[in-house]
Amino acid sequence: TQLLEQSPQFLSIQEGENLTVYCNSSSVFSSLQWYRQEPGEGPVLLVTVVTGGEVKKLKRLTFQFGDARKDSSLHITAAQPGDTGLYLCAGYYGGSQGNLIFGKGTKLSVKP
Amino acid sequence: ETGVTQTPRHLVMGMTNKKSLKCEQHLGHNAMYWYKQSAKKPLELMFVYNFKEQTENNSVPSRFSPECPNSSHLFLHLHTLQPEDSALYLCASSQDWSGYNYGYTFGSGTRLTVV
């Protein structure tokens, strides 16, 4: 069974700080996605990474896919209160049907 | 409306009740999903429908019964639930059957409480 481990589970920081959250697996994924979920809402897709070593930037967010495609990181520069939420990584492992496997998430709180 | 719409947003039901959750997508997607989100657990895939055909049932108890009358609508019928079934139930859709290229679009969820 494929498992995605996310760390840390919880993170509370002050506005303006930088942070990195991690997503690790023992399996190789064909692609990996990051979602953000705000309280009372469903997850919203932020990015999809496909190629080992790939780096994508979305404003202050930088996403990296590990060379071996078993891990990923999300770095936020100068965090803002609007970044508060649950960050989920989800890996696609392929197969005849194939579906996304989600991690438990990192709950981020950015205080003004 | 655009996106994925779920109703109701909140539902409280007794263990002997029968209720249904509704999901509607206006994105022209071909695949729809039901997920369960509980505290301290990863999102759990329950059912997958691709072009209205159920392609996956992740060992979900029979007290949960999905229905997909067309590619835009998805229902989850609930009966004789247990308190441990209390959770956020999320509906999602994707353009392709796996979400590989474009990911999933989620609804806002139904917060279900079983008393």
Image (cartoon, coloured by chain):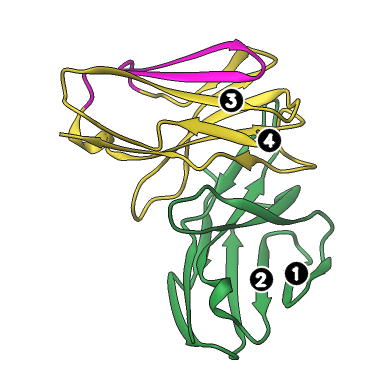
> Residue A11's x, y, as percent?
45, 78
Q: Residues within 10 Å of mark 2 (few under 14, many from 20)?
A: many
Q: Say above or below: B36 vs A23.
A: above
Chain name for mark 3: B
Of all residues, the one furthest to the top in this rendering is: B69
Residue located 46% across and 40% down the image:
B109
Q: Residues within 10 Å of mark 3 (few under 14, many from 20)?
A: many
Q: Amino acid at mark 2?
A: Ser
Q: Say above or below: A43 vs B85.
A: below
Q: How far is disc 2 from disc 3 in space, using C-alphas?
A: 33 Å
Chain name for mark 1: A
Label 3 or label 4, whichever lies nearer to me, is 4
Q: Amino acid at mark 4?
A: Thr
> Residue A9's x, y, as percent?
43, 69
Inspect the magenta stretch and tell me whether residue B76 lies in it: yes
Q: Which residues are magenta?
A: B61-81
Residue located 67% across and 66% down the image:
A72
Q: How far is disc 4 from disc 1 in space, using C-alphas?
A: 31 Å
Label 4 or label 1, whichever lies nearer to me, is 4
Q: Earlier in the sequence, mark 2 or mark 1?
A: 1
Q: How far is disc 3 from disc 4 in space, using C-alphas?
A: 10 Å
Residue where numbered disc 3 is placed: B24
Q: Colour of chain A?
A: green
* Disc 3 secondary structure class: strand
* Labels 4, 1: one chain: no
Q: Is residue A91 left or right of residue A102?
A: right
The numbered dot on residue B2 is 4
Q: Residues within 10 Å of mark 1 (few under 14, many from 20)?
A: many
Q: Nearer the viewer, residue A94 or B4?
A: B4
